C-alpha cells in the first residue's frame, strides 16, 4: 500500500479569514490536535477485499514528547486477534505483531507525524507506513514538507450516530509524484475533532475510519508507553 504522510503548517488558534469554510474547519481541527498534550481514541476501519467486507478495531494513545501506542488487529485465528502494535516511550520505539519487534530510536518528529495522521490521512495510513518502513525520521521530514492539500469543499451536514457533523472533502497529493487521493472527513464543529473519514485510493478501494471515545488533554497511564 502506498502511503502518504503529511503536515501543512499553520498558526494554531488563529482565525483564517482568507480560507474557505471547509478549510477553516480542517485547520481549526488540525491546530487543536497539534496543541493537545494528549490524544486518545478508538477507531473502526472498514474496507472491502473483493466481495468481502472487513472491519478492524484499534486504539491510539499519544502524548507530547514523542510517546504513543497504536494497536490495530491484522487478522483473527479462531477468534484470537493478532495485533500490529507500535509503542514509543519517547526515546525507543518497538513495532510489530506484538509490539515486541526490534527496538529503534523513536523519530524526534513523531509528534508532528501523529498529528498529521489523525488530522488528515487516518490511522490506516500510519500502519501502512510502518509496514513499508516509511517511519524513519528522514522519511517523515520529507513527507511533511512534500505533501499538498487542495480543493477543500463542504459536501454536506449530517449526523454520524448522535453527533451533528460537517462533511468536507479535499485532495491530498505529493509534490513529486502520483495522483492525489480524495478524502472525505466528517468533523464535529462543536469540538473541532474528527468523527469519520473515507480515503479513496487510486485503485478505487476505500477505507472508512470511524472514531469513538475521542479525548484530548486527559492523563494517560505510564504503562501504556512501556516498550519492555
Image (tube, grey):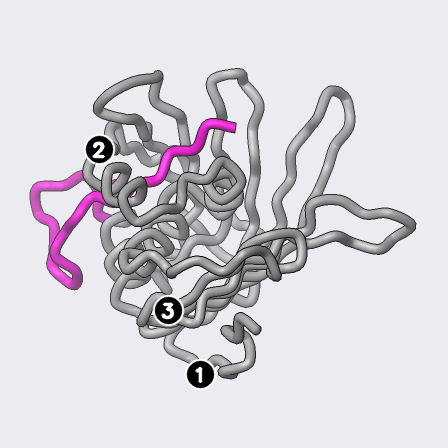
Q: Which residues are magenta?
A: 1-24
User: Is residue 79 rendered to the left or right of residue 112?
Assistant: right
From the image, state whether disc 3 or disc 2 is nearer to you.
3
Residue located at (24% from left, 58% from top): 31
Q: Which residue is mark 3?
A: 91
Q: Examine the image and state in which quarter residue 52 appears.
A: top right
Q: Nearer the viewer, residue 161 or 221?
A: 221
| Secondary structure state at the residue bearing disc 3 | loop
Q: Nearer the viewer, residue 180 or 66?
A: 66
| Secondary structure state at the residue bearing disc 2 | helix
Does residue 13 show up magenta in the picture?
Answer: yes
Q: Nearer the viewer, residue 158 or 177?
A: 177
User: Is residue 151 rendered to the left or right of residue 93?
Assistant: left
Residue located at (77% from left, 21% from top): 51
Q: Earlier in the sequence, mark 3 or mark 1?
A: 3
> Residue 195, position in %: x, y?
48, 53
Residue 135 higher or lower than 33, as above or below: above
- Mark 2 neighbour density, 10 Å: few (under 14) some (14–19) many (20 or more): some
Magenta residues, dominant SS class: loop
Say the numbered circle drawn on residue 219: 1
**Can residue 202 be seen at all in this image of the molecule?**
yes
Q: Earlier in the sequence, mark 3 or mark 2?
A: 3
Amino acid at each position: 500500500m502506498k502511503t502518504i504522510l503529511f503536515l501543512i503548517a499553520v498558526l494554531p488558534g488563529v482565525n483564517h479569514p482568507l480560507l474557505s469554510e471547509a478549510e477553516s474547519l480542517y485547520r481549526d481541527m488540525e491546530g487543536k490536535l497539534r496543541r493537545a498534550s494528549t490524544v486518545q481514541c478508538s477507531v473502526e476501519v472498514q474496507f472491502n477485499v473483493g466481495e468481502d467486507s472487513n472491519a478492524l478495531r484499534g486504539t491510539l494513545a499519544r502524548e507530547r514528547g514523542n510517546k504513543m501506542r497504536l494497536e490495530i488487529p491484522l487478522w483473527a485465528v479462531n477468534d484470537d486477534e493478532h495485533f500490529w502494535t507500535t509503542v514509543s516511550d519517547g526515546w525507543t520505539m518497538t513495532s510489530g505483531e506484538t509490539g515486541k519487534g526490534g527496538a529503534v530510536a523513536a523519530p524526534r518528529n513523531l509528534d508532528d507525524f501523529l498529528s498529521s495522521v489523525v488530522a488528515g490521512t487516518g490511522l490506516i495510513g500510519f500502519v501502512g507506513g510502518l509496514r513499508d518502513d516509511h517511519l524513519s525520521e528522514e522519511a517523515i521530514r520529507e513527507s511533511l514538507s512534500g505533501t499538498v492539500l487542495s480543493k477543500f469543499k463542504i459536501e454536506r451536514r449530517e449526523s454520524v450516530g448522535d453527533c451533528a457533523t460537517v462533511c468536507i472533502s479535499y485532495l491530498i497529493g505529493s509534490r513529486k509524484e502520483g495522483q492525489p487521493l480524495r478524502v472525505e472527513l466528517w468533523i464535529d464543529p462543536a469540538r473541532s475533532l474528527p468523527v469519520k473519514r473515507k480515503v479513496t485510493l487510486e485503485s478505487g478501494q476505500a477505507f472508512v475510519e470511524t472514531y469513538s471515545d475521542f479525548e484530548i488533554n486527559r492523563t494517560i497511564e505510564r504503562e501504556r508507553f512501556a516498550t519492555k
